[in-house]
Amino acid sequence: MDSTQEPGSPDGTVRVLARGLRILKSLAPRNDWLSNSEIAEIVGLPKPTVSRITAALTSMGYLTYAYATGRYRLAPPVLALGYMARVNLGVPAIARPLMQALANEHNALVVLAEHDDMAMVCDEVCHAEDSIVSLRVHRGSRLTLPFSAAGRAYLGSLPPAEREKLCEEIARRFPQHWDEVREGIRQAAIEVAERGFCVTMESLERGVNGVGVSIDLPNASGRYVLGCAAPAFHFPREHLEKVIGPAMLVIKRRIESSFNPARQPVAA
């Protein structure tokens, strides 16, 4: 078998598909025009490989090519698929008003995210009306898994065996930060087990602290996570632990109760 082929795929179709999806992801969420060289740098593939795949994706209508600049962007069929998936998700619709109320009350950034590779992808983002948060986060933003509050909450909520397996990949991908990250993940798991949320202090961006909490839904294929962040001077640890964390647990339980009537939300 050719060493480049995927197990169980004699013609390497699975590998080509995986690479094609990685290229499509590289253009999201901003959908800026990118060249083959720029895409190759983002996805970590040789430029000739990227060139072949972008040409195929263009011929199938998934990418638009600008002849004048030699750059690509996502075509309407891909954007339509994303919109269709989004409008059929009940969790963001239920979570958004609760998230916005929390953001406004505490002058914070609140996100609803899902895990994807080494990132937490934001499905919903709520900024306070008079935001003082420096993070430029919007729908589709990818927060680095081992550094963000949402990522730490996700890792801390996983069963030990799943967490260990994912940590092995994190150690491989972030070797220079692994000692610091390992301790942060260990602490997150302890905090999630003890109080249902975890606190991060300047782990994603200097001067920004946050809280993360995992949402448990019946028959869900993935795991949603709420993250809340604000400048460190506005969100000291005591405030995170005594005010923001408990407030996020209220939102978590209200969302869960919407999908499982047996669960009763906790009064604010």
Image: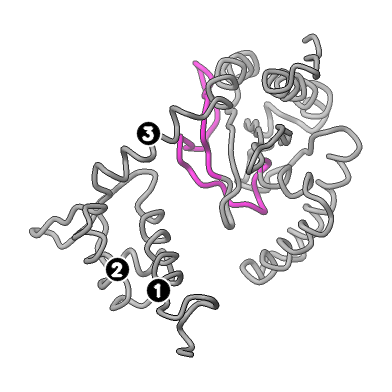
Binning the other alpha carbons within 10 Å of mark 3 as few (below 14), some (14 to 19) or many (20 upward) gives few
Is 123 one of the magenta-colored residues? Answer: yes
Binning the other alpha carbons within 10 Å of mark 1 as few (below 14), some (14 to 19) or many (20 upward) gives some
User: Going by the picture, which residue comes out furthest to the right?
Assistant: 194
Callout in the foreground (1, 3): 3
User: Going by the picture, which residue comes out furthest to the left?
Assistant: 68
Residue 83 has which mark? 3
Amino acid identity at mark 1: Leu
Instruction: State which region is magenta.
Output: 121-150
Residue 53 has which mark? 2
The residue that label 1 is drawn on is: 45
Check the image and report above or below for 205 versus 182: above
Callout in the foreground (1, 2): 2
Mark 1 or 2 closer to N-term? Answer: 1
Residue 32 is left or right of residue 118, and the answer is left
Amino acid identity at mark 2: Ile
Q: Nearer the viewer, residue 175 or 88?
A: 88
Q: Position of residue 67 (x, y in %)?
A: 9, 59
Label 1: element kind = loop
At 59% from the left and 28% from the top, the residue drawn is 110
What is the C-alpha distance between the residues marked 2 and 3? 24 Å
